[in-house]
Image (cartoon, rainbow, N blue to C red):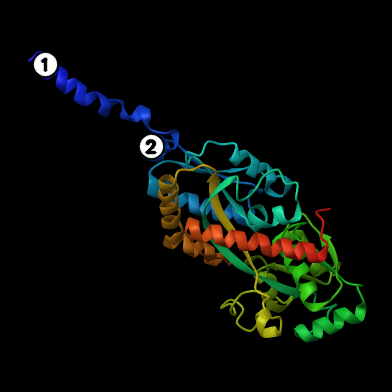
């Protein structure tokens, strides 16, 4: 009897002790989620990436059965929030949802950036995207199409300006790319967000701007700005009369302002896949899609592998635009 008891104990001991031998990442994968999941938004409340993060968070919470909160840590064009996330444990309880600037443009524009958007993160998914629309002040710019606009710009020999939501934003780099495609000279006037950039365009303090489809659509519809082209692959159902950049004559001029979600580097693959599944379910929920339609975004929902390849291409693309334009963050 005593020998059988000892044998039973010896058989059970490795099993009972196994969890202690598991890596920290493996234990996190088994437990996730064991507490509140925080999605860091490195921009202010009400920004488009913040709105999307909150829509995802609502549905993720329903799916995983634990609270999901969005925490805003704005500043330094997303760097403050990004650095907070990379210092967090890779256990899936701290994630970051951010726009193209944080994931791809900052590193192209600022070589001494305080984080590496590839090396310091576990990318999980591109969440949404939206094209930009080239709009002009109709009272100042008498151009009905791209050819007329380029002719007007060249005749003014640099005496024109464009507004953006800030240095390093998608609309900034899109216009710099436009200048390179068309050989035009236009002065950059950065603002602290898309709303003031649009306000000054309408007021006539600048002549043109690239803005996200969803944010500029109301001003287009009420005639306060005139659309020239859209940067999507195909025409938008929201603006069916507006040609794409390619249709207008700019071959290869396709640009999306996109957003993505990820966590700190070092996340276990199984854990990353589990979180990705929760994110994908949230993105596919009808309420999320309805909300994205309202603000002019298209749901993407790529895999971690797809996002990694996409992000690499985007960083290379914007580095080339920055290099050719000799663009600085100042």
Q: Quadrant of the N terminus?
A: top left
Is 53 located above or below residue 249 in the figure? above
Residue at the spot 71% in from the left edge and 84% down from the top edge: 249
Q: Does residue 63 appear to the left or right of 233 in the view shown?
A: left
Residue 295 screen position, x and y as percent: 58, 64
> Pointer 2: what residue?
31
Is 5 located above or below residue 300 in the figure? above
Q: How many marks?
A: 2
Residue 179 screen position, x and y as percent: 80, 73
Q: In which quarter of the image is residue 223?
A: bottom right
Q: Which of 137 and 32 is in front in this view?
A: 32
Residue 15 screen position, x and y as percent: 26, 29
Residue 295 seen by the camera: no
Q: Nearer the viewer, mark 1 or mark 2?
A: 1
Q: Does residue 65 appear to the left or right of 14 in the view shown?
A: right
Q: In which quarter of the image is residue 82?
A: top right
Residue at the spot 70% in from the left edge and 84% down from the top edge: 248
> Pointer 1: what residue?
3
How many neighbours does mark 1 have within 10 angstroms: few (below 14), some (14-19), or many (20 or more)?
Answer: few
Q: Residue 296 carries which label?
A: none
Ranked by sequence position, the earlier of labels 1 and 2 is: 1
Is 144 located above or below residue 117 in the figure? below
Residue at the spot 87% in from the left edge and 72% down from the top edge: 185
Q: Does residue 279 appear to the left or right of 2 in the view shown?
A: right
Q: Check disc 1 and report its element: helix, strand or loop.
A: helix
Q: Check disc 2 and report its element: helix, strand or loop.
A: helix
């Amino acid at each position: 009897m005593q020998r059988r008891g000892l044998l039973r104990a010896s058989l059970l001991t490795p099993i009972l002790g196994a969890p202690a031998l598991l890596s920290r990442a493996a234990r996190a994968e088994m437990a996730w989620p064991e507490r509140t999941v925080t999605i860091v938004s490195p921009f202010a409340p009400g920004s488009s990436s913040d709105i999307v993060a909150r829509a995802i968070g609502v549905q993720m919470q329903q799916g995983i059965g634990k609270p999901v909160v969005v925490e805003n840590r704005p500043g330094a064009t997303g760097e403050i929030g990004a650095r907070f996330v990379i210092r967090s444990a890779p256990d899936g309880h701290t994630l970051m949802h951010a726009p193209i600037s944080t994931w791809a443009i900052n590193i192209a524009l600022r070589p001494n950036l305080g984080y590496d958007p590839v090396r310091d993160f576990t990318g999980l998914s591109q969440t949404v995207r939206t094209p930009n629309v080239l709009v002009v002040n109709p009272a100042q710019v008498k151009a009905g199409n791209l050819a007329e606009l380029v002719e007007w710009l060249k005749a003014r020999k640099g005496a024109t300006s464009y507004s953006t939501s800030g240095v390093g934003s998608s609309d900034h780099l899109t216009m710099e790319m436009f200048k390179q495609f068309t050989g035009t000279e236009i002065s950059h006037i950065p603002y602290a967000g898309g709303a003031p950039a649009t306000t000054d365009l309408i007021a006539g303090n600048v002549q043109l701007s690239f803005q996200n489809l969803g944010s500029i659509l109301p001003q287009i519809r009420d005639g306060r700005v005139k659309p020239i082209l859209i940067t999507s692959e195909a025409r938008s159902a929201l603006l069916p009369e507006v040609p794409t950049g390619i249709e207008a004559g700019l071959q290869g001029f396709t640009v999306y302002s996109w957003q993505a979600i990820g966590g700190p580097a070092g996340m276990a693959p199984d854990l990353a896949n589990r979180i990705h599944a929760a994110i994908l379910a949230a993105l596919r929920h009808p309420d999320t899609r309805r909300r994205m339609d309202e603000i002019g975004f298209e749901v993407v929902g790529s895999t971690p592998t797809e996002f990694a390849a996409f992000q690499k291409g985007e960083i290379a693309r914007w580095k080339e635009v920055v290099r050719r334009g000799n663009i600085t963050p100042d």
